[in-house]
Amino acid sequence: MTVTAWLAVAVFLGAYALIATERVHRVAAALGGAGIMLLIHATDAGTAFFDESTGIDWNVVFLLLGMMIIVGVLKQTGVFEYLAIWAAKRAKGRPYRLMVLLVVITASASALLDNVTTVLLIAPVTFLVCERLALPVVPYLIAEAMASNIGGASTLVGDPPNIIIASRAGLSFNDFLVHMAPMVILLMVAFVIMCKFLFRRHFRYDPERAAAIMTLNEREAIKDRRLLWQSLVVLALVMAAFVLHPVLHYEPSVVAVLGAGILVAATKVTTEEAIAEVEWPTLVFFAGLFVMVGALVHTGVIGQISQAAADATRGQLGLTTMTLLWASAGLSAIVDNIPYVATMSPIVEGLVQANGGGETAQVLWWALAFGADLGGNATAVGAAANVVIVGIAARNGTPISFWQFTKYGLVVTLVTIALVTPYLWLRYL
C-alpha cells in the first residue's frame, strides 16, 4: 500500500477509537476524520461529495431526511401513542412479550421497507410504551435495530446492500425471497429466544402499571384524525413506491423527499414543525462516516483486504463461500455495510465467473448478502439502522454507548452467522 493508504488507515482507526471510547462526540470524531482524509489527499472534494461509490451516499442521507419529516408529522397525530397502548395491551404489560411483539413487527416491516425507515417509525412507539410500563427503553431499541437488520436481509428492498447485490448480479425480488427469506425466518426465531436471555435482567414487570394500561382506550390517543389520514395516505404511497422500485425506477431517497414535501404542502403543519424531529447530528455523522470509508475505498485499502481474502481461498467454492461469509460479517462490523458491499460486488462477480457462473456459484452472492446484512448487527456503526437508533436515543435523553450496543451485537452476529454457515453449506455445497 502507498503512504497515503497507510495514513488513511491510521486516521480511520483513530476516529473509530474515539467513537468507540466516546472520548469525543461521535459527530466530531466522524467530521474530524473526514476533514483529515481530505487534508492528506486520501480523497478529494469530487470523490467525497460526488462519486457514487467512494463518496457520501446522498441517497441514504435524503432518504433519512424525508422519512424523518414524515415521522415528525405523524407524531403530531397521536398515532404513536395509539400504537404504544395497543402493543402494551396485546402484551398484557409483560416485558418479554412486549419485546417479542415489537421485534417481530420490526422485522416484518423491514422486509417490505428499508430497515432505516422501519426503525424511524417504531422508535417513537417504543419510547411511549416503555414510559407507560416503567421499562428501560435501551434494550428494546437495541433489539429493534438488530431485528430490522435481520428482517431486512430477507428481500431485495429490505437492506441497501441487497439492492447493490441485486443490481450487480442481476437477481430479482423473488430470488431473494427464495434464497434468503426461509433462513431469515429461522434466524428471527433464534433471535427471539436470544432476547429472553440477553435482556432478561431488564424485564421488570409492574402489575399496577400493567393493570392501568389495560383500562386505557387507545382510540382516545388520536389528536387529529384528518392529519392522520392525510399522513397515512402519503406514507402508504411512499411504501408502495419503495416496493415498486424495480418497476418505477425512482430511488427511495427521491420517493421519501417527494412524500415529505407533499405532506408538508398539503397539510396545516408548518415547515418549522415538520423539520423539528429531524436528527441533524445523525445525518452529519453519516456524511463524515461515508467520507472516511470512501477514502479507504479510494486508496484501495478495502479492495486489497477483500482481494487478499479471495486469493487465500485458492478457487475452492466451499472455502471461498465460508471465507466470504465470515469476512463480510467481520468487515461489516467495522465499516458501514453499504460501501463494503459496493466494493466487494465486482470481486464476487469475478469469483462467480471463475467458478463456472452457474446456479451453484450463486451461493457466493448469498454469502456476501448474509455476511454484510447480519455483520452489521455487531457494532453501533455497522449498519445504518444502528446509527439511526443511537441518534434517536441520544436525542430523547437515553444515550446508547458504543460498547453497550456492541456487547449484545457481537453475540447476535456470531450466533446468526454460525446458523447461516450450515444452511449455505447444506443447501448449495
Image (cartoon, rainbow, N blue to C red):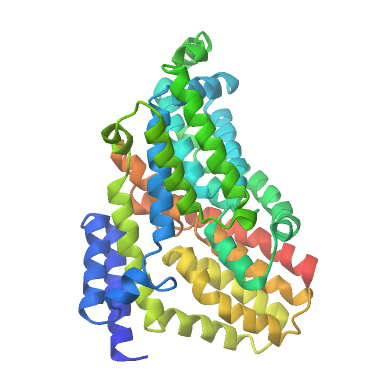
> What percent of the width, then of the height, locates residue 58?
39, 60
Residue at x 41% of width, y 31% of height: 266
The answer to whether one can see residue 257 in this image is yes
Frontmost residue, 419 versus 155: 155
Residue toward you, 114 or 249: 249
How far from the left and from the top, in percent, is residue 33?
25, 69
Question: Viewed as shown, does residue 35 lie left or right of 259?
Answer: left
Q: Residue at x 73, y 61 (%)?
A: 175
Who's the residue at 72% across and 78% down the image?
318
- Decide: is 323 above or below 375: below
Residue 115 to residue 52: above or below:
above
User: Observer-nearest residue: 339 or 48?
Assistant: 48
Residue that appears at 24% across and 63% down = 31
Extreme residue toward the front, this view: 266
- Left or right of 292 in this view: 113: right
Quarter of the figure with the N terminus: bottom left
Please indicate whether residue 396 sits to the left or right of residue 127 in the image.
left
Question: Residue 348 location in percent, x, y?
Answer: 61, 78
| Residue 106 in sight here | no
Image quadrant occupied by the C terminus: bottom right
Count of numbered circles in the view: 0
Left or right of residue 369, residue 382 in this image = left
Find residue 337 and report its horizontal and vertical position in percent.
48, 64
Q: Is residue 423 above or below residue 272?
A: below
